[in-house]
Image (spheres, rainbow, N blue to C red):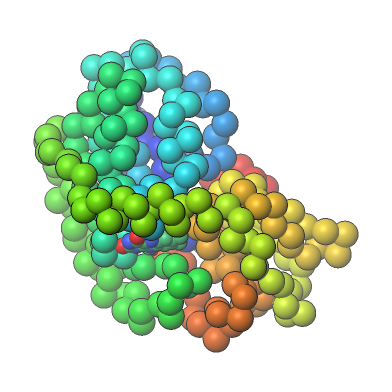
Amino acid sequence: MIKNAVFYFSGTGNSLNIAKDIAKEMENCEIISMGSSKNYDLQAGYETIGFVYPTYYRGEPQKVREFISNLNLKNNQNTYYYAITTCGKYDGNALVHIKYLLKRKDIDLTYGKKIVMFSNYVVAYDMRETIEEETKQSQKDLIQIIQSIKNREINKLFITEPLQEIAYRVLIKFAHNMDKHYNVSDDCIGCGICKKVCPVGNVDLDDNNIPCFKHHCEQCVACIQYCPKKAINYKNKTQSRRRYTYPGIKYTELAEMNKND
Ligand SMILES: Cc1cc2nc3c(=O)[nH]c(=O)nc-3n(C[C@H](O)[C@H](O)[C@H](O)COP(=O)(O)O)c2cc1C
């Protein structure tokens, strides 16, 4: 029987939605979280294997790198491999890094594409107001990408400017500890959504159900974005900024997929 797999990582649902839409179009396709699945035991015989993840600092999240490094692909040498990175605009080397990572395992990343989606990094900027337009556009762009995957298209990926590479290497190192600057206001109602949506189990609740952060944060900002009270903030930067989550991806779905409940 034909089988396909899509591995995804997602904070605010963009990449999960892409993974779901791809999976719908592929026969018998599993969707697997790269955040919460530890030592995933991949069986043999997949026709296609995809990786879908957000661009962080012009590269990939550390968890994605770690997950793919640990993934045993020996039994899937003749599979069609593709990677899709969702980004606000600039994907930098987010795809090419995965190509090189797979190359070390003697695997060719046959096809890689970025898809521009709503840019969610509320810690760094006040997010755009164009959710509806951007969502519609990305849905349109995805149709072509899915077609390319179905046609088993091949494309070449090259490293972009070295400056972007340097920026990635510097910034990604800070990500894990940036949660030291997260604060929780008195508006927190102790609902625990922050813990459930965190794809890497970085959030715990104290005796009063107030979140605390464990310093292996990926900076996916799911806890900030899904908090129904805007009670989680970064320094004094995000209090007045709007929040974003992909329309239609509810926290319950991420929680279920994260198996972090
Ligand atoms: C830590 C962080 C870094 C980001 N860096 C970039 C970037 O370098 N280039 C870009 O175009 N978008 C960047 N973004 C935006 C995300 O890539 C984009 O919103 C993505 O679709 C979010 O996916 P998700 O909802 O699945 O988490 C960044 C977002 C975060 C949280």
Residue at image position (21%, 44%) is: 159
Q: Is residue 95 among the parts visible in the rendering?
A: yes
Query: What x and y, as percent, mark residue 8?
Result: 41, 43
Query: What x and y, as percent, mark residue 207?
Result: 87, 59
Q: Is residue 80 left or right of residue 69?
A: left
Residue at image position (23%, 31%) is: 109
Q: Is residue 158 left or right of residue 59?
A: left
Q: Residue furthest bottom?
A: 240
Residue at image position (55%, 34%) is: 37
Depth check: give the residue in front, 221 or 15: 221
| Rendered image quadrant of residue 197 | bottom right
Query: What x and y, as percent, mark residue 181?
Result: 64, 68
Residue at image position (22%, 26%) is: 108
Depth check: give the residue in front, 233 or 161: 161
Query: What x and y, as percent, mark residue 24?
Result: 31, 43
* Residue 109 drawn above or below residue 180: above
Q: Residue furthest right?
A: 207
